[in-house]
Each structure stands twice: as C-alpha cells, then as structure tokens.
Image (cartoon, rainbow, N blue to C red):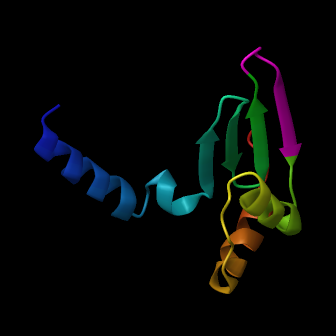
C-alpha cells in the first residue's frame, strides 16, 4: 500500500456511517503484562501465556476500565455513548 492511500482509508474508516469505528466503543492497549481490549461492554485481557479473561461491564464498569486500564479520563459528554455501549448485547 502506498503512503498516500493510508490517509484515504483512515478517513473512510473514521467517517463512513457503517464503519464499526463509528458504531462501537473500541479501546485497545498492549503492555508487557497483557493485551487489553474493550469492545462495547466486554473487556478482554489476554496474557502472554495465552490465558484469556473476559468481563461484561455496566456503564460504571466501563468508566472504571477506561480510567484504570486505559488511562483515559471519561468526559461528561461521553455519558450517552457509554450507556449505549453498556446496553449492547455481548458478542461472544
């Protein structure tokens, strides 16, 4: 892929109404201890040994994960997004 194509694909993924980046809460972080992924209301932690831990979170749990696991500070205007993510059915 050419460098100038990345900009186009990034724009498409971040703006198209059907893009999962616009319709789901997605946060990921990799450390030496584990890979952490928050997809809507499901937090998945994968350790280097292959152990997988999954938790389904309510809105308060999502806020705590954003703060404690991902180092993010949820903003008041995120409230509706976090409530919607918490209410989505799990995708196991």
In this picture, which residue range is highlighted in magenta? 48-55
- 19 left or right of 28? left
Residue 64, x across and y down, in percent: 83, 62
Please tell me whether residue 22 is drawn above or below residue 36 in the rendered image: below
Residue 29 in which image quadrant: top right
Q: Residue at x 72, y 70 (%)?
A: 82
Q: Residue at x 76, y 16 (%)?
A: 50
Residue 26, x across and y down, in percent: 60, 52
User: In the picture, which quadrant includes the N terminus?
Assistant: top left
Residue 49 in which image quadrant: top right
- 89 left or right of 6? right
Q: Is residue 87 visible?
A: no
Q: Residue at x 82, y 20 (%)?
A: 51
Residue 92, x across and y down, in percent: 77, 35
Residue pushed farthest top?
Answer: 49
Please tell me whether residue 61 is drawn above or below residue 83 in the rendered image: above
């Amino acid at each position: 892929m050419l460098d100038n194509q990345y900009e186009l694909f990034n724009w498409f993924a971040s703006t198209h109404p059907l893009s999962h980046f616009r319709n789901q809460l997605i946060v990921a972080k990799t450390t030496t201890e584990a890979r952490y992924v928050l997809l809507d209301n499901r937090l998945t932690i994968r350790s280097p040994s292959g152990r997988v831990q999954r938790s389904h979170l309510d809105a308060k749990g999502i806020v705590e994960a954003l703060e404690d696991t991902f180092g993010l500070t949820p903003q008041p205007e995120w409230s509706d997004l976090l409530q919607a993510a918490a209410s989505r059915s799990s995708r196991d």
